[in-house]
Amino acid sequence: KMEAGRSEEEIAPGLALLGNIIQRFTTVATTYEPNEDGSKDKCFISSSFDGTSHFEHDVADMLNLYKRITGEDLDMSINADSVEADY
């Protein structure tokens, strides 16, 4: 996340460590986060999806959203082979 809104200045120290860069592109995308967690008004909103690889942030946000709605962590230990399908 950008702190001051000046992407070029914020990444300059890291780019300096890389040395000579043949080609570079910089993209800045606006993302949003909910103002409240939904506990008061029961309006549960996720954060904007971001550009991280493998969707790490998005999965963490969905797990957080599940917990805010249900009050429990999502049990991911279920073996799909041991339950009957609903299809």
Image (spheres, rainbow, N blue to C red):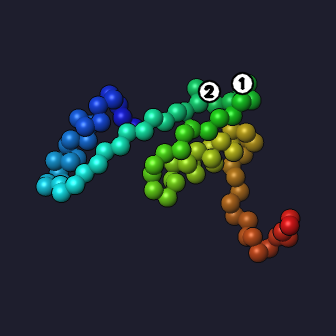
Horizontal relation, residue 6 to residue 22: left or right: right
When the figure is inspected, residue 41 is found, relative to residue 49, above or below; the finding is above
* Relative vertical location of residue 82 with respect to residue 47 in this rendering, above or below: below
Whether pointer 2 and pointer 1 mark residues with C-beta atoms closer than 8 Å, the reply is yes
Kindly identify which residue carries mark 1: 40
* Disc 1 residue type (three-letter): Lys
Image quadrant assignment for residue 86: bottom right
Q: Residue at x 69, y 45 (%)?
A: 66
- Residue 54 percent coordinates (x, y): 49, 58
Residue 58 in the image: state x and y as whole percent. Answer: 55, 48
Residue at 22% over, 47% down? 14
Residue wearing tag 2: 36
**Which residue appears farthest toward the left when viewing the image?**
20
Residue at coordinates 57% horizontally, 38% vertically from top-left?
Answer: 47
Q: How many marks?
A: 2
> Which of the 4 image quarters holds residue 44?
top right
